[in-house]
Amino acid sequence: MKTIFRKTEKSDTESLKKLWLSCFDEDVTAVNLIFDSDLFDGCCAVVDDRIVSALYLVKGTLNGEKSHYLCGASTDKSFRGNGIMSRLIDFALNDAKNNGDVYSLLFPANDGLYGFYAKLGYAQSCTVKSREISRQTLENFAEKGLNIGCSKENSFIYNENFFEFAKSYYEIYGSKVINKNDCFAVFDENENTADVFYSAYKNINELSALLLENTKSERFVFTGKSDNALFENCQSQKCGMIKSLDKNHKIPDDVYIGITLS
């Protein structure tokens, strides 16, 4: 059984959508949005003219170096267990390296896959911290103008148009999105709690005011970059993996991937 590894083409779109939907519990509208965008550089494995495996790279930078976020790694059920995905990742990373990428980042679909990616050279050096904040505390933040912002150091920085895509993507799943006044935040509401699972801002007071305007929740759970002063004394937790594609570039500590696909 000969397997061909190559970059995806426009003519592959319908086959790629079908594969994605067979592997992920994804809304069809969200999948159409993904494939209608030009943000996802695809690679695929082909057997007998049939696409049996695929993955996608979203371009960005990490500490000023060209990098990518690898997502959508999927293999047809009948072709799993043959090492196709491992070889496809190797193909994709070699291509990315040849195009100047220094780091590859990803978020395993489940905890059981951390071991799989570790065998491919990825390290568990991506972290986040979480903190629960009351509405009253957020009101205090909004009033006091605290000097707490988001550092770009050791953060994966997506291209600007990715955030417009992310806004549309998460709204399909019912999340609320704030994109105003140099603030970007995505949150879900559950009973009386707003789960702010991604936020980027120049100052927490501006984001606090916007959150208070957009939800009546009494509790807020923030998840974000480990070195942010908002999370002082909070415990780090693993959240993704990273691999260096260049032996001259060491993997930084506590890398923050940021917003990802659900």
Image (cartoon, helix red, strand yellow):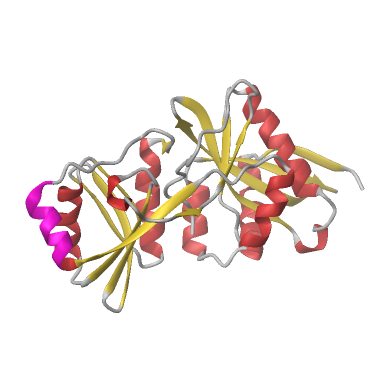
Q: Is residue 31 above or below residue 241?
A: below
Magenta span dominant secondary structure: helix
Quadrant housing residue 219: bottom left
> Camera-side residue: 146 or 57?
146
Check the image and name the residue furthest to the right.
Answer: 1
Name which residue lies at 65% across and 23% down: 247
Name which residue lies at 65% across and 42% down: 122
Check the image and name the residue furthest to the left.
Answer: 143
* Residue 101 locus on image (x, y percent): 57, 27
Name which residue lies at 18% across and 71% down: 216
> Camera-side residue: 90 or 12?
90
Quadrant housing residue 174: bottom left
Q: Is residue 106 above or below residue 151?
A: below
**Residues shaded magenta:** 136-145
> Camera-side residue: 228 or 200?
228
Residue 139 highlighted magenta (yes or no): yes
Name which residue lies at 12% across and 54% down: 142
* Residue 188 locus on image (x, y percent): 34, 67
Check the image and name the residue furthest to the bottom.
Answer: 191
